[in-house]
Amino acid sequence: MSADTLVLEARGLVKRYGHVTALDGCDFDLRAGEILAVIGDNGAGKSSLIKALSGALIPDAGEIWLDGQRVYFHRPLDARRAGIETLHQELAVAPALNIAENVFLGRELRRPGFLGAALRMLDKQRMRDDSTRQLQQLGITLGSMRQAVETLSGGQRQAVAVARSAYFARHVIIMDEPTAALGVRESNMVVDLIRQVRERGLAVVLISHNMPLVFSLADRIHVARLGKRVAILDPALVSMSDAVAVMTGALVAPSASRPTAP
């Protein structure tokens, strides 16, 4: 697949809550195998955009396309079935469950034959084996897959959540503030994981207020303001201060970094 191929795109998304317009004709483009950062001030429409792309919100108008096909997401499960996984800011792990159970949380594997079909018994060994293989492929070193997640550090818990998203995603992983509330060392571990995910061919949408993180990871930066996409920036061509100025409206984006027509 070409690096210029659009995996996920949106055109003219609109979402209103009474007199408040959260999305005002917002466009979005995600290329194959890239890390696209989404930045914007509070109220810029970032959360509404991500919710629309992940099925948590139904836009009032506009279109969403996945691999060149128009899609209609009425709930998050629709997006997940289409191959889009979302890693929310609040860690989506069950602390009392073990690592393997968290990797397969909500999508547990059942034992073959009568035991799984009639008695609904889980195939715990297969889940442990698959979880071990998935974490190894991402370079994640943890203890036994039987280890309770509540015994892990914040960064390790985030690693389990990333591993789960990477295991089930077929097209896109959306990460909302993946290093929030983590220390420097644990943040660096998550950054390495995000690069590993991209190297496996998945496109990543990164929502973050952490500008050093954005500039260290992103191939392109989607700038949101007042419910619209106002610019697409190349982090190799603009400074952090200029990116913040474009985000706040203090600076008009250079013409070379403006969004191009699809």
Image (tube, rainbow, N blue to C red):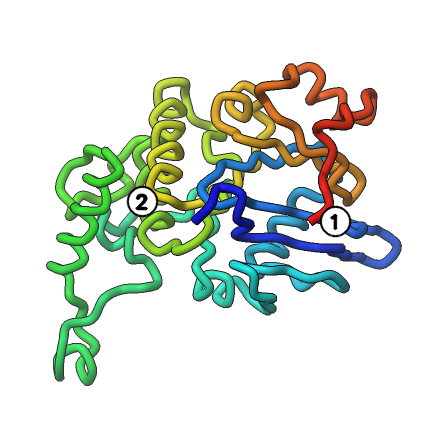
Q: Tag 2: residue type?
A: Ala
Residue occupied by mark 2: 163
Callout 1 environment at 10 Å: few (<14), some (14 to 19), or many (20+)? many
Q: Residue 150, which numbered label? A: none
Q: Residue at x 38, y 30 (%)?
A: 190
Which mark lies nearer to you, 2 or 1? 1
Q: Earlier in the sequence, mark 2 or mark 1?
A: 1
Tell me where residue 125 appears, x and y as whole percent.
Answer: 11, 59
Check disc 2 and report its element: helix, strand or loop.
Answer: helix
- Answer left or right for 217 relative to 24: left
Q: Is the residue 45 above or below the residue 113 in the image?
A: above
Residue occupied by mark 1: 26
Q: Is the residue 128 above or below the residue 204 in the image?
A: below
Q: Is the residue 51 above or below the residue 138 in the image?
A: below
Q: Is the residue 63 above or below the residue 110 in the image?
A: above
Callout 2 environment at 10 Å: few (<14), some (14 to 19), or many (20+)? many
Report the residue that reaches farthest toward the front. Answer: 2
Is mark 2 in CB contact (under 8 Å) with mark 1? no
Real-space Cα separation, disc 2 to disc 1, in angstroms: 30 Å
- Answer left or right for 122 relative to 214: left
Q: How many marks?
A: 2
